[in-house]
Image: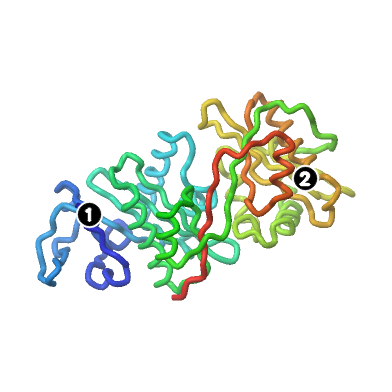
Amino acid sequence: MRGAIKPVRSRAADLDCTNPGGGNLVGLILPISGAAQQALPPDFVTRNGDGAATTLDAMRLVEITHAPATARRDSLLAFVEQLAASGGSRPLSDHLWLDLKDGDGTGSISVSAADDGGVIALAHIARANEGSVVEVVVDPELEDVPEVHDDVLETAVDTFRGDGGGHLTWWTDAGDEPAQRVAERCGLHLERSLHEMRVALPLDSRATVTTRAFTPDDADAWLRVNNAAFADHPEQGGWDRATLAARLAEPWFDADGFRLYEHDEEVAAFCWTKVHDEMSPPVGEIYVIGVDPALHGRGLGRELTLAGLDWMTDHGLHEAMLYVDGGNVAARRLYERLGFDTQRTRFAFAGTLAG
């Protein structure tokens, strides 16, 4: 049977208990075996429908942290990496992954569900450009994935409200009626979509412009172009040196695959590629592509796309992927003309939530 309790603001007053792992045990869902009970504070009890205290039956635990202690952070990272190993790709976007791994906890919220075997679900919120972003990952082997998913998501959203609220975007692979219902309960509405597109390599065409590899000395010039190109973008805009440095420190980063185009001896456009070695066979990704708005209309978007694809081809890759905003019709048409097909679509439900 399902024993979920919502929302967190109504249950936290009764169930909030400090956890040595670095967070708060704020809820109980779904029966588990007795081993996990031993980790609970001895006075941790639930209440039945008539308000009388009862002994704790075997349950799963929901835990909230803002700046998790090392042991808890490591357990959450291990959970995500375990899902990545079994699924072929990391289920958290890079922005949220880096915030979970290296962030200082400012504006972050991690809500997990765990049983006696460890973490089984995670909802993570991180600050982004002019707002915050949340994503949810759940062990796909569970029999009740939708229920657990919604529990950690709604708890994270309620905690976000309790911390003062603000603009929140939930990214998900589901855009169906159940997703719309839970979004509505959270005060969110469908705002954007993101298409994953793929193409076989090599293409018949190659770039006609000259590009070069990124160097550390290009950081400020690249940030200028990126932030101008993505001025209104909730995740890619508003980067600073620290944001860039976190990406450059990732094990997948290859400066040679970060292609820059210069105009009048200044960085004017770029195509940043990423190789997914965890996929079999490996797949190249156009990670970010941008053009200085002052040079729009010169066909540089197509040329830089080709430059990135050329780099992938020259390094032995046979398939490329990219993500494009559903509202960017011009970019989608460009990629379709180059042979890209849409493989899947992600959905962004968003809203400004009062504290």
Q: Residue 53: x, y in percent?
A: 11, 68
* 150 left or right, relative to 318: left
* 102 left or right, relative to 16: right
Q: Earlier in the sequence, mark 1 or mark 2?
A: 1
Give the amino acid at mark 1.
Arg
Q: Nearer the viewer, mark 1 or mark 2?
A: 1
Rounded to the nearest whole Å, what is the CA distance between mark 1 and mark 2? 51 Å
Query: Which residue is more in the foreground, 298 or 100?
Result: 298
Q: Do we see residue 324 in this rendering?
A: yes
Give the amino acid at mark 2.
Gly
Q: Do we see residue 38 in this rendering?
A: no
Q: Residue 244: x, y in percent?
A: 63, 51
Element under disc 2: helix
Taking the spot 36% from the left edge, 41% from the top edge, the residue there is: 140
* 91 left or right, relative to 342: left
Q: Residue 172: x, y in percent?
A: 48, 51
Residue projecting furthest to the front? 177
Q: Residue 327: x, y in percent?
A: 65, 54
Taking the spot 82% from the left edge, 53% from the top edge, the residue there is: 296
Which residue position is annotated with label 1? Answer: 2
Quadrant where the C terminus sits is bottom left
Query: Which residue is more in the foreground, 87 or 144?
Result: 144
The label shown at residue 301 is: 2
* Rendered image quadrant of residue 299: top right
